[in-house]
Amino acid sequence: MHETAAAPPLISIRNLSKRFETPRGTVHAVRDVSFDIPRGSITGLVGESGSGKTTLGRALLRLIEPSDGQTFFDGIDLNTLGAGAMRAMRRRMQIIFQDPVSSLNPRMRVHEIIGEGLRAHGLGDRRKRRDMVAGLLAEVGLQPDHMSRYPHEFSGGQRQRIGIARALALEPEFIVADESVSALDVSIQAQVLNLLLEIRDKRNLTMLFIAHDLSVVEYLCDKIVVMYLGRAVEIGDAGPVYRAPAHPYTRALLSAIPIPDPERQANREILAGDIPSPLSPPSGCVFRTRCAHALETCARGEPGAHAVSANHTAFCKRIEELA
Amino acid sequence: MSASALADEPGFLEALFARRAVLVSLIVFLVILAAVILAPLIAPADPSAMSVRNRLAAPGGDYWLGADAFGRDVLSRLLYAGQVSLTIGCGVALVASVVGIVFGLVAGFFRRLDGPVSRIVDAMMAFPDILLAIALVAILGGSMINVIIALSIVYAPRIARIVRASTLVIRELPFVEAAQALGSSTGFIMINHVLRNIVSPIIVQATFIFAYAMLAEAGLSFLGVGVDPSTPTWGTMINEGRQYIDQAAFLIFFPGIAISVSVLCLQLIGDGLRDALDPRIAKEL
């Protein structure tokens, strides 16, 4: 929010909204979300299922068309680009999916999967593409002679590495990792996370890491955006957000992280109830129906951005009283 | 494309031939196919050579399967007629598949075209097959090409419906979204991501259409609205033999057997393919 660093952020999201019209009414999946993703950073986007974090990731890549707002990529407003210009821009931004099974076409060989982007953008001939695929396979820790196999011949972790190689093939500057390790075993998760960190350092990538597992996000991310019911509720650098969460929702989320020490009793803030229906979100602050600190005033008017410190903002009216 | 897709199925042939009936059907059908293709070499007589002396000759002797009202050899006519019947069946299966795939992909991929295309498909499927075919042949005129066109129009909606339904499922899968994120064109996504994954159900349905088309062709020829009557088909042979049913029942018996056996084999092969290509059933076998 308050970028004071000299380099402008790679991505600036401004008032992004995505509405879905359903037979039962309008679902505001993402509502008026604004934040920046600094160059070379890994920004974590966290929230429960239904918080809109996946929709936000898709809308920012224009895999779905946003209803409102702007997404600036290196200063270019993506939502004003025509189909041809957008296709050309796709080289610079990629996505890694959650499900390592359904994200790879079962009828394509690995070299076709990883080389698809190269082919789509007319890069290299058939032989050159194969060489590039071999290099990518080595980079993600697979054998180059795996390229003639089909996805079903690989384990979940290996498939996720294929998905990462596919995203890297076009040498993008920015990658959205959508719950990219949550479908994997914990031991494999660590390997894949370390691979992502390694690649980020080597290629100076900027990433948006979407997750619901806060311990994973803490390990990986420089900056955190917490979402609840389609809205950003807290945005800040990872250190301050983890050490001193300002929004009651973030506090509850962080207190839910298991502590690997049986002697210590966790001081849990248990959230009552479920996330409300996005068809009829609560008035005012969307979190007030589950917030232990909600007052009457929380139902009236949306909570604006309240600066907690430099580079740390929370969307809560009672932030000073609760600090 | 289809061959590689089939070969990928683990244990595909084992699953296919786990049912003895499928193996037998395939062998019988291949024998029929070979006999029909090799008709010029193996037919004992010229199929149109008449011999008034031998009219309605009973099976046996020089005429293995008897002779018709003009004294023409039934076996030779059966083999040559099979060329027409199988060509029409095969042609319809191919043309209907191609047309059905195009319409199905378009309907499944472009939401705006889905309504109109699907309504046309529904309307065509509401017509009784044979009536629609008769009407179309009446409009187009009776020739082998026109019969293939007419029957393809009749059966293409079945393929289109399957392709549309499968496309709607597959286009929502993450690998299609990945292709969009990579910047692949819609045409590439349709062929390489969607079509490659629905080859199996199309092959199964095409096999059934092969069988339906042969039956429909026989029906059209029997009714006299099929191909030019001077070309023998199994349907016209039954139609011509009908008048002599009390003196020479074999005239309708042998072409009837030819149709029944071919169609039965194709149906059983189609059943077997469906079971073998469906991983859930294939495992149980």
Image (cartoon, coloured by chain):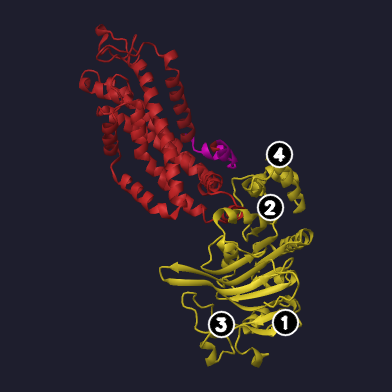
Chain colours: A yellow, B red
Residue ID for mark 3: A287
Pick the residue in front: B8 or A49.
Answer: A49
Is A32 one of the magenta-colored residues? no
Marks 4 and 1: same chain?
yes
The answer to which of marks 1 and 2 sits earlier in the sequence is 2
Residue ID for mark 4: A127
Amino acid type, label 2: Leu
Would residue B224 be found to the left or right of residue A114 on screen? left
Tell me, yes or no, if residue A88 can be seen here: yes
Secondary structure found at label 4: helix
Image point (39%, 29%), residue name? B262
Magenta segment, which residues?
A: B3-20
Amino acid type, label 3: Phe
Is B6 one of the magenta-colored residues? yes
* Vertical side of A120 occupied by B65: above or below: above
Amino acid type, label 1: Ala
- Name the subunit of mark 2: A
Residue ID for mark 2: A170
Residue ID for mark 1: A310
The answer to which of marks 2 and 3 sits earlier in the sequence is 2
* Vertical side of A64 occupied by A236: above or below: below
Q: How many angstroms separate mark 4 from mark 1 (CA)?
A: 51 Å
